[in-house]
Image (cartoon, rainbow, N blue to C red):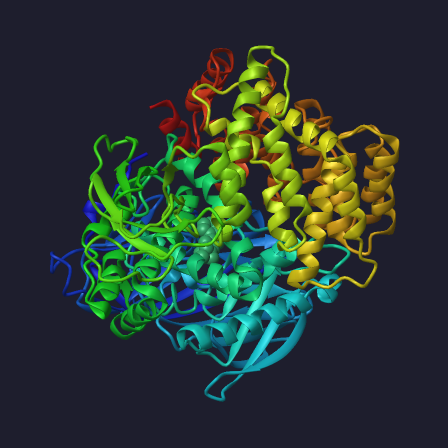
């Protein structure tokens, strides 16, 4: 397969003004009648260029150009396109195609889930519905009529406003939808089925009433309230923060159990994975409630950042995704604890994006090339992209950022634009030079910021020498310096922040500064510093970099106890933890005894005892980094040593803090009805972290605590946490069985049951995973099932997947090949489990390479899997 290059971008030869679609839905085939009003694009370099429409897996019935039926000599057809060479400058094209949603297992294009029909068109799914200019810079006005059997498919939905409906014949009815806004085809949506509706309304700031509708399978109607509340909160927040109102009369959400990603922002008709809609206290955890609020906000926010202003081409994907993730993060920060939300975002970034940036799939926030665009819905585009947007705000302040956003919408509403256009709006609205900042979009890799400090007591100066570098990534051996916002404070011996005055300034300016680091090495001197401080660096994680500062253990303990910045406080605990974990891992590798250091245990004891701290922050400070994150810190990965070192730390802390953990666990009990409120969530999170440690100790009385918690839990957060502790012991089996019996008919709850076992130390092995794949609740065609069992195992159970006998590797290669035939996007995500192969110890490295080569040699591999496998082997 050929790579597509950013440098080859050319404007489309034709633009489409209007699209009229009619769908005749049926169980065995669907007829799509498309009427396009097009005109030649003056911006295209060739004024006589052919019209080349994208299309895949379509059966063409007929083509009419300006009313005349075209015979086969007037167009060329291949597996990917329909080309008409002789085209007038203005034309009406009518195309009839047949498609087969009932056999479409890729969940891309129009597909069936149960007896209902759903669509997914981003990025290039519309071409599986009809021949079209399936690229985001072709924006058209869509009208959609859906015709279907009324008994089987009573609800017929598409984008925009419903303008008519009626009965066609004895059995069939029709509904017509008009979307008044121009949009690219990737935002098209169609849903047909037997669905129940939760209805509500929202009055916008300017007084318009919007109907809110959530459509789900009838059995799920009692799990939509939280989603509806989240919609209303999102709408209010976007008005208050950015002055952005909803623009249609109806906002619809549809939930479907078969879905490749989290959700999709189709204009006026968002389609969601059920995982991000359905929640009841007994079926969904706090993490699920939180995820639903964030994803609903994310898709809703896309209405402006993505839909009203969209991407010129898919290389600009982060223009909408990075910006919208940033917006949903800011929303979540306002809904709950801002610092907890920030720490969690940083954990995700470090665990997943830093790994991506250091591996074979590393790419810039604006990639230069891709083979399959679906492989580029990555943590780099989303999460690093959000960090890049956050840096504008850190440099400009919230008001400056808002000025930039206002100008962006003023300039580009209704357009398909680039990351450079966004950057220009930020720069022009504020008179700020963001030219060097452009490198965040073009250079891959995680920069390293090395800081060294010197205190001169007699001159009362504190000097920071700052140097930056960035490792080579595929195709980019040399990097130029980034523009890095470095937020910092100086913490005095009493724990208070010192006033900050840079050399050359007349007076101190606050106790926190954002320095602009732009050179490869740069010096900053603070004056009038009366005592030697401890630097609190990269506050609130002001840039997506790795910080290197030679903190002493005493300095870390000081920050951990006093830093006014919650992120840096957490960071100090993590740095201390990581240092000791590394020692334990090294000791495990050398077969030496594994013991915890006293000052570390004392610091953790202090954290746990600090009742003035937000319990959610305490929980995060006591949580160890993931095995995969630890793996990424090693020169060579030995999964067994990582497992042994990490387990030793958990067990050591549990033993040393047994009584404090138990006391905190008992203190945090709460028998009241479940509430999804920040304070209650925080208490539950710390309580369950304590329980997790206590169940490391194989003591019947402590395991009984977990059993009791499971038995009397009035919410899934507590039930799942109890089971997570038990599942590592034989005592867990009875509870697992009871859980499966109780929840056999709740697909999302059974997903949790699969994941708990996939991640269990005791059960997370290939034999068990294969056995679970035979369970009646498992389905290889359902992405949620694949992710919760197989994905969890290969991505998050380092020692289980990387069993020394190589069984994990042959298992996953076999599974990838099976799934690739059904759903290449899902198969490609599993292929990402090979991304660390070059860093594994020799035996596992060879075994992984052998499986990669086996995959590469397969005939008929999808583009999706081919791209991941071939980049791994480069
Ligand atoms: N913009 C949406 C992306 C998406 C997607 C991409 C490829 C294949 C399937 C997909 N489903 C949704 C989701 C979002 O970022 O909001
Ligand atoms: Zn998005």
In this rendering, does residue 808 appear at all? Answer: yes
Q: Is residue 745 left or right of residue 16?
A: right
Q: Is residue 266 above or below residue 654?
A: below
**Residue in the picture at 41% in, 32% down:** 868
Q: Position of residue 594 (x, y in %)?
A: 63, 19
Q: Position of residue 256 (x, y in %)?
A: 61, 57
Relative to 658, does residue 186 appear above or below in the rendering?
Answer: below
If the picture is divided into quarters, which one holds ligand 2? bottom left
Taking 128 as reference, is 4 left or right?
Answer: left
**Numbered-mark total:** 0
Residue at 30 percent across and 60 percent down: it is 508
Q: Position of residue 810 (x, y in %)?
A: 56, 20
Rendered residue at 72%/39% (across/down): 692
Q: Looking at this rendering, what residue extends furthest in the front direction? A: 458
**Quarter location, residue 407:** bottom left
Give how far across and how far down residue 35 sits, in percent: 36, 68
The one nearer the camera, 870 or 347, is: 347
Screen quadrant of the C terminus: top left
- Seen from the viewer's position, the closer of residues 301 and 286 is 286
* Residue situated in front as seen by the camera: 431 or 368: 431
Q: Assign the N terminus to one quadrant of the image.
A: top left
Q: Quadrant of residue 274?
A: bottom right
Residue 98 seen by the camera: no
Left or right of residue 17: residue 204: right
Q: Quadrant of residue 656?
A: top right
């Amino acid at each position: 397969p050929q790579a597509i290059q950013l440098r080859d971008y050319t404007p489309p030869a034709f633009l489409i003004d209007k699209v009229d679609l009619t769908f005749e839905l049926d169980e065995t085939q669907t007829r799509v009648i498309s009427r396009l009003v097009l005109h030649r694009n003056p911006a295209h370099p060739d004024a006589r260029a052919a019209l080349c429409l994208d299309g895949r897996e379509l059966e063409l019935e007929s083509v009419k150009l300006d009313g005349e039926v075209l015979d086969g000599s007037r167009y060329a057809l291949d597996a990917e396109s329909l080309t008409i060479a002789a085209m007038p400058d203005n034309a009406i094209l009518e195309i009839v195609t047949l498609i087969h949603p009932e056999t479409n297992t890729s969940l891309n294009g129009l597909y069936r889930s149960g007896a209902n029909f759903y669509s997914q068109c981003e990025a290039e799914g519309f071409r599986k519905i009809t021949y079209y200019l399936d690229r985001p810079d072709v924006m058209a006005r869509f009208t959609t009529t859906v015709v279907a059997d009324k008994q089987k498919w009573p609800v017929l939905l598409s984008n925009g406003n419903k303008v008519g409906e009626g009965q066609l014949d004895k059995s069939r009815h029709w509904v017509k939808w008009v979307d008044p806004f121009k949009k690219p085809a990737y935002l098209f949506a169609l849903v047909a089925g037997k669905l129940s509706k939760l209805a509500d309304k929202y009055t916008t700031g300017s007084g318009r009433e919007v109907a809110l509708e959530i459509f789900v399978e009838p059995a799920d109607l009692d799990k939509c309230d939280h989603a509806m509340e989240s919609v209303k909160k999102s709408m209010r927040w976007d008005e208050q923060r950015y002055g952005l109102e909803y623009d249609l009369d109806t906002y619809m959400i549809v939930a479907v159990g078969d879905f490749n990603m989290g959700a999709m922002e189709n204009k006026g008709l968002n389609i969601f994975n059920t995982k991000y809609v359905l929640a009841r206290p007994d079926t969904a955890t706090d993490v699920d409630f939180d995820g639903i609020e964030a994803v609903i906000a994310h898709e809703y926010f896309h209405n402006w950042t993505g839909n009203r202003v969209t991407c010129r081409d898919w290389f600009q994907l982060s223009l909408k995704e990075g910006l919208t993730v940033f917006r949903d993060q800011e929303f979540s920060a306002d809904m709950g604890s801002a610092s907890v939300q920030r720490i969690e975002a940083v954990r995700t970034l470090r665990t997943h994006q830093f790994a991506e940036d250091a591996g074979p799939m590393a790419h810039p926030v604006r990639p230069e090339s891709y083979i399959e665009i679906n492989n580029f819905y990555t943590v780099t585009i989303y999460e690093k992209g959000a960090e890049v947007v956050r840096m504008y705000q850190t440099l400009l302040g919230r008001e400056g950022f808002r000025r930039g956003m206002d100008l962006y919408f003023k300039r580009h509403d209704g357009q398909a634009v680039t990351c450079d256009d966004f950057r220009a709006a930020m720069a022009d609205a504020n008179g700020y030079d963001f030219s060097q900042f452009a490198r965040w979009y073009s250079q891959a890799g995680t920069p390293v910021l090395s800081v060294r400090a010197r205190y001169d007591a007699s001159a009362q100066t504190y000097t920071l020498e700052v140097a930056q570098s960035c490792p080579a990534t595929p195709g980019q051996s040399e990097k130029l310096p980034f523009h890095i916002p470095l937020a910092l404070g100086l913490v005095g011996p009493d724990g208070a922040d010192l006033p900050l005055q840079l050399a050359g300034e007349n007076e101190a300016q606050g106790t926190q500064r954002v320095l602009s680091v732009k050179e490869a090495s740069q010096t900053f001197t603070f004056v009038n510093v009366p005592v030697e401080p401890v630097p609190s660096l990269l506050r609130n994680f002001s840039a997506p970099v790795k910080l290197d500062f030679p903190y002493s253990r005493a300095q870390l303990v000081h920050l951990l106890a006093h830093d006014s910045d919650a992120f840096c406080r957490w960071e100090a605990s993590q740095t201390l933890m990581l240092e000791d974990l590394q020692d334990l891992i090294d000791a495990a590798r050398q077969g030496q005894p594994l013991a915890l250091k006293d000052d570390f245990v004392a610091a953790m004891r202090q954290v746990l005892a600090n009742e003035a701290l937000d319990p959610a922050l305490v929980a995060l400070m006591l949580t160890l980094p993931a095995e995969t994150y630890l793996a990424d810190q090693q020169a060579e990965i030995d999964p067994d040593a990582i497992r042994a070192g990490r387990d030793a730390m958990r067990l050591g802390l549990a033993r040393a803090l047994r009584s404090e953990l138990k006391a905190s666990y008992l203190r945090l009990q709460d028998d009241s009805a479940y509430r999804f409120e920040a304070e209650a969530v925080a208490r539950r999170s710390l309580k369950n972290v304590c329980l997790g440690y206590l169940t490391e100790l194989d003591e019947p009385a402590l395991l009984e605590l977990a059993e009791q918690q499971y038995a009397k839990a009035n919410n899934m957060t507590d039930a799942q946490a109890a089971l997570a502790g038990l599942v590592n012991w034989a005592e867990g089996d009875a509870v697992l069985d009871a859980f499966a019996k109780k929840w056999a008919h709740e697909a999302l709850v059974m997903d949790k049951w699969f994941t708990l076992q996939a991640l269990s130390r005791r059960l997370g092995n290939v034999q068990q995973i294969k056995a679970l794949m035979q369970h009646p609740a498992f389905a290889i065609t359902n992405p949620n099932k694949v992710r919760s069992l197989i994905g969890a195992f290969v991505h998050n159970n380092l020692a289980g997947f990387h069993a020394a006998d190589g069984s994990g590797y042959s298992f996953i290669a076999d599974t990838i090949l099976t799934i690739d035939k059904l759903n290449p996007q899902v198969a490609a995500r599993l292929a990402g489990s090979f991304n660390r192969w070059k860093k594994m110890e020799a035996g596992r490295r060879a075994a992984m390479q052998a499986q990669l080569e086996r995959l590469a040699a397969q005939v008929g591999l999808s583009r999706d899997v081919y791209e991941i496998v071939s980049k791994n082997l480069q």
